[in-house]
Every structure is written in structure tokens, then in C-alpha cells.
């Protein structure tokens, strides 16, 4: 069964790369009517690789990452310090920037996943993400929420990212439901 899931995941990634290479919009990339991912500015949103290519690469090198994750509830902040090979850290930094840009531009990288839908809606206004390259092999990511809802969404997302690192494609294939208490907490902040 796992081999079938891995094969399907590989086929899906290949299809996304083929479509992206032909400038065909892919669901979840928030393409505009010209087939391009909208951006707040060309400088902010021009990237070397399509999102699917980076995700596939990161899944392939996930076991090479060593990370420290900390929560600071009183400040509504989480911090990741991730160490790994230089090429993997470069790809991870670009991936995080891509996702941030897509969300800030009105898109949703995983429009089929309830947690990521909520995160996209909340992130645009209430979550700040800092990406700090401390060295060629070390990346610090700091996410801060403006309210309790945003902080809970950050924490849920962090758990999913830990799942991506620990379980790889098996976690990618999962749909991440949002606990009702978080939905209740966030309802005042949703448009």
C-alpha cells in the first residue's frame, strides 16, 4: 500500500512539474488569468524553481535536516532552527518564501486541505513570518501571531511540518482537519 501511495505521489509531482513548465495553472497555486502566480512585486515573488519541484526535493532530503523547535506562548511565537546541507537549506528558504508569497498574494498552496485553507486566510493579516539565514547550513524561521487564533494556526502548521520531516510523503497525502475549538477561536477573524 505504501508503495502505491509513493508512486501516486511521484506521479502527481511529475504532473505538476509538467504543467508548471508549460505555464498551465495548477490547482492551489493561485494562478491569475495569465497563468502566472500573482505577486505583490516581481522582486518578492520571482523564484528559481516552481513550488512543486522544491517540495519534491525537500521530501527527498528530509532525513538530512536536524531541527530544534520551540514555542513561546506568552509571545504567540514559534521558532525553528534548521540545520542541513547547504543546498537543502537554500531550497527550504526558497520554499518558505514561495509559500509566503503565494499566500500574501491571495493564493493557497494546498487548497484541498482545511488547515492550509484556514492558515492562508489568517496568515494574510495576522501572522508574521521571518526567515533568517544564519549560515549556509542553518536557517531560523520565526512565526508570530497577532492573536490567539493566529498562534494556534501557527502551532497546528508546525505539527504538520514536523510530520512532513518525519513521515515524508505519507504526511503529504494526509488531509489535516482543524479542531473545532480552533475554528471557534478563529471565526471572528475570518472574512
Image: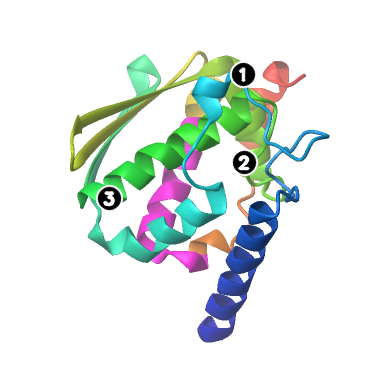
Residue 169 in picture, x, y percent from top left: 49, 66
Q: Quadrant of the C terminus?
A: top right
Q: Residues within 10 Å of mark 1 (few under 14, many from 20)?
A: few
Circle 1 sits on which residue?
40
- Residue sitting at x 39%, y 56%: 58
- Residue sitting at x 66%, y 34%: 118
Q: State the residue in front, 139 or 182.
A: 139
Indicate how the structure is coloured in the image: rainbow
Q: Earlier in the sequence, mark 1 or mark 2?
A: 1
Q: Quadrant of the N terminus?
A: bottom right
Please tell me the numbered disc located at residue 116: 2
Q: State the residue in front, 16 or 126.
A: 16
Residue ranking furthest to the right = 33
Please tell me the numbered disc located at residue 87: 3
Q: Residues within 10 Å of mark 2 (few under 14, many from 20)?
A: many
Say if residue 6 shows up in the picture.
Answer: yes
- Residue sitting at x 46%, y 32%: 97
- Residue sitting at x 74%, y 49%: 27
Residue 64 in picture, x, y percent from top left: 24, 60
Q: Earlier in the sequence, mark 3 or mark 1?
A: 1
Q: State the residue in front, 151 or 181.
A: 151
Residue 111 in picture, x, y percent from top left: 71, 45
Q: Pointer 3 and pointer 1: residues touching (CB < 8 Å)?
A: no
Region in magenta: 153-170
Q: Is residue 167 magenta?
A: yes
Amino acid at each position: 500500500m505504501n508503495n502505491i501511495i509513493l508512486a501516486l505521489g511521484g506521479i502527481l509531482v511529475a504532473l505538476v512539474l509538467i504543467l508548471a513548465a508549460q505555464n498551465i495553472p495548477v490547482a492551489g497555486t493561485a494562478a491569475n488569468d495569465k497563468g502566472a502566480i500573482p505577486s505583490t512585486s516581481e522582486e518578492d515573488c520571482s523564484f528559481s524553481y516552481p513550488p512543486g519541484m522544491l517540495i519534491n526535493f525537500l521530501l527527498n532530503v528530509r532525513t538530512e535536516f536536524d531541527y530544534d523547535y520551540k514555542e513561546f506562548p506568552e509571545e504567540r511565537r514559534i521558532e525553528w532552527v534548521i540545520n542541513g546541507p547547504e543546498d537543502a537549506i537554500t531550497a527550504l528558504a526558497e520554499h518558505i518564501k514561495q509559500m509566503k508569497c503565494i499566500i500574501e498574494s491571495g493564493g493557497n498552496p494546498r487548497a484541498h486541505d482545511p488547515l492550509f485553507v484556514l492558515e492562508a486566510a489568517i496568515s494574510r493579516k495576522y501572522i508574521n513570518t521571518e526567515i533568517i539565514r544564519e549560515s549556509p547550513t542553518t536557517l531560523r524561521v520565526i512565526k508570530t501571531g497577532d492573536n490567539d487564533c493566529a498562534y494556534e494556526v501557527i502551532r497546528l502548521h508546525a505539527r504538520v511540518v514536523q510530520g512532513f520531516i518525519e513521515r515524508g510523503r505519507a504526511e503529504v497525502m494526509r488531509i489535516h482537519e482543524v479542531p473545532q475549538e480552533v475554528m471557534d477561536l478563529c471565526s471572528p477573524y475570518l472574512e
